[in-house]
Structure formats: structure tokens, C-alpha cells
Image (cartoon, rainbow, N blue to C red):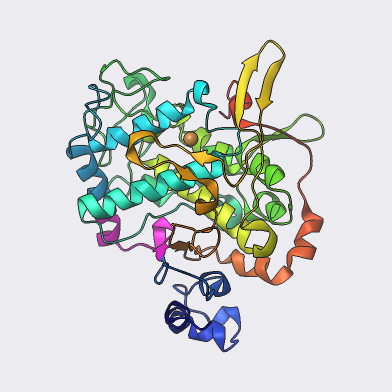
Amino acid sequence: MYSFAFALLFLHVPQAVFGLPASSLPSNDLLFPELAAREDTPVCIEPRMRKEWRTLSDPEKSSYISAIQCLWDLPSKGTDRIPQLRSRHDDFVYSHLEATRFGSGGIHGVGVFLPWHRHFIWVYENALINECNYTGAQPYWDYSLETRAAGGSWMTSPLFDAETGFGGDGVRALGGCIQDGPFKDRKITLGPGDKVDGKERCIDRTFSPTIVEGAADWDSSMMPLWGIEKFEEFQGAVEGVRILPGGVMKPGIHSVGHGGVGGEMQNVFSSPNDPLFFMHHAALDRVWALWQSLNPATRVMAIGGPTGMAFGAGGMASSGKTTLNTTVNLGFVADEMPIHKLMDTTGAQGEGILCYWYEKSPLGEEDMMRMRGVENLAKMKPQGTVVPWAQASVAPFA
Ligand SMILES: [Cu+2]
């Protein structure tokens, strides 16, 4: 059936349809139009385009930051349940904090890790748009741009700009509190740990600038991800810490974001207190979406991993197996959602509810990976064994 949605999406990507080489595509084109342009797409006509932070104009950056401030200034919708919640932003922090508690199986090191955070970002993005009049999409962060190989560095990242970004490092002598940028005067109360005691503190950061080298560069860190075929193996590679032959630790990119920023971002429970959390998890979600797009037939609906983690004397024990019918629970900020509805960012498969895609990063290496083909990418599979993030959180790259 040639649906209206199908036709509209084709209008968005004429160059791709007529087979011009990828290099002639303007940067705002859909990278993988075939994913978005399936004719069975029921509701996703115009996917939100999530862009890399540095491709936003200054007014776009400032409108995103203002929308976050708005969530912080809006009242909580959950005070009937949790009287300590002080703002709408707190509602999201609490959602993550509560879901991280192991009594519910947790959301890290388990099969719901990627879909849970995907839904979380989606609901947060919806709140920015629907409750704070934000007209853009959730931006993402391409960590590979901060590596030497890409001519960048952590410390000069535009993400940390005091005027147009999220502000920079904390000052250790001042309790690690951030001293510049739009959030320097924000007081947070949820956490640390899963504490909900209403005690005020600052947003703190403790940068580990070297973390991106050897952990987020395109050639040695990102390329080996694409050829992994099994979902659990892919999740482990992005979420956990890889132990290479000889004992060298290579953090997955989930650890790069949390460990590189440090401070509140290192807090497994309350890290969404730092707005960089959402840039970071959009980055991770994009990597998952790119991985899915390389072999949509098998990867878009691929899920697995344990449903819960329990810490015991013998380390971690897992229980159950995550399936497409396992639900993702964000507490009071969203309806409970079966995973199958969250697998396809363009909503076409699995009765999907999502509708967004990621615009190409300025790095431009995605085209290269695309051209190599999955068979060739599979030869680059990563080395070593993986320790899940929840377990590795006792290590420096939590
Ligand atoms: Cu998390």
C-alpha cells in the first residue's frame, strides 16, 4: 500500500531516492531514509530531527537551555505521592532514581537499559515541547568529536561553554560545584544515592578529560560496535566497561559520559539532576539507533538480557529474560510501556509510539560505516570481555 505518510517522507529525501552519492546530501537529510520511509508507518509522518549540539545555532541552543530552566520552574506533578519534589524537572530525576532501585529489577545492566532510557528521553523531550513551548528536538552529543583524532578535546567542547552551553567543570575547592553556565545557581535535592531528604546541594562536576581518548574515538571505539550482531553483546559494549587482554579497561560510551563529566553525573540514581544527562543519553540512544539501522530486519526488534539484577556474596545474579513484552516503567511521569513499542524510533515496527531520527553528526563518519556494509563491519568486532556498568560502578568509570 502506498500510504500518504510514505509519500510525505519521500518528499523529505529526494536526493537519496534518486540515488545521488551520500556526499552530495546536505547535512540535514535523513541518514537512513529507508528506515523512516516505510509504508507501514502508522503515525510517524515527520520525525523530530535530533541534532548534534554544535550544529544548533546560538538561538536554538538558548531555546533548549531555556526549556530546561522552564521545567525547573514548573511545579511538580507528583507531590501527592512524593512531597519532597520541588519542580517538574525533579519529577524526571525522581523517575530515574526510583527505577534504579534494585527492588524493581533496576534499569542498568539489565535488558530494559536501552529501551527504558529511550522512553525516558522521549517523555522528557515531550515535556519540553508540550509544557515549555520548546520548538526543537532533544539534541545529542557526539563524543567522538571530543577526541584528538577528530581534532577536538574534552576541555574545549562547546557543550561546556558558559554562554552557549551547559557550563564547565566544578571547582574542587568549592565542593565540586559548577561555577559558570546557566545552571550554576540551581539547587538540587534528590540524591545522592536514592536519598529523598529535601537537603539542598549544588550541581557538581569532576571532569576526567582523558576518558574520551581510546573510548570514544571513531576508529577504535565506535567502528567495532557496528558489526556486533547480538543485542546483549551490543548493550554490554556500550554500557559496560571492556577488559582488554592485559587487563586494560576500556569504558563503553555510557561510561564515557557519566565518568567524563563526573560529580552528579556519576550518581547512578540521581544523575538526571545534571542536564548533561539528557545530552548523554541521547548520544547513547543514537548509537543504538545507528546499530539498529545497519540491519533493520534483525536488529530493530532485537532485545534480550536479564530482567533484574541482584547483588549477592557471589557477585551479581540475574533473573528472568527481557522480551519485547517486558514493560518499561517510568513511574508517574509516563504510562507503563511494553518494550516492543519503543524499539523503532520512527514508530513503524512493533506498534511503535516514537517518531524521531538523528541528524548526521558533523564528524560525517556515519557514511563511511554505512558504505562498508554489515558483513565487513562484523570483522571488526571488539576484543576482550565486558563487565556491566552496575558492577563496574565500583571502578573509576562508573
Ligand atoms: Cu540511567
Q: Which one is nearer the viewer's eye here, 66 or 2?
A: 2
Residue 214 at least partly seen = no
Image quadrant assignment for residue 92:
top left
157 to 197, vertically: above or below = below
Which residue does the image show at 23% across and 42% down from the upper left?
71
Residue 218, position as x, y percentages in the image: 63, 55
Q: 135 or 59: which is nearer to us?
A: 135
Quarter of the figure with residue 97: top left
Q: Nearer the viewer, residue 303 or 295?
A: 303
- Picture coordinates of residue 179 (x, y %)? 28, 32
Residue 53 among those drawn in magenta:
yes
Residue at the spot 48% in from the left edge and 23% down from the top edge: 101
Residue at the spot 22% in from the left edge and 27% down from the top edge = 79
- Residue 227, horizontal then vertical, whole percent: 74, 56
Q: Does residue 216 appear in the picture of this structure?
A: yes
Horizontal and vertical percent for residue 126?
32, 52
Total numbered labels placed on residues in the image: 0
Q: Check if residue 125 falls in the magenta segment.
A: no
Q: Is residue 27 above or below residue 167?
A: below
Quarter of the figure with the C terminus: top right
Which span of residues is magenta-colored? 48-63
As drawn, 59 above or below 125 = below
Residue 190 vs residue 347, the one in the foreground: 347
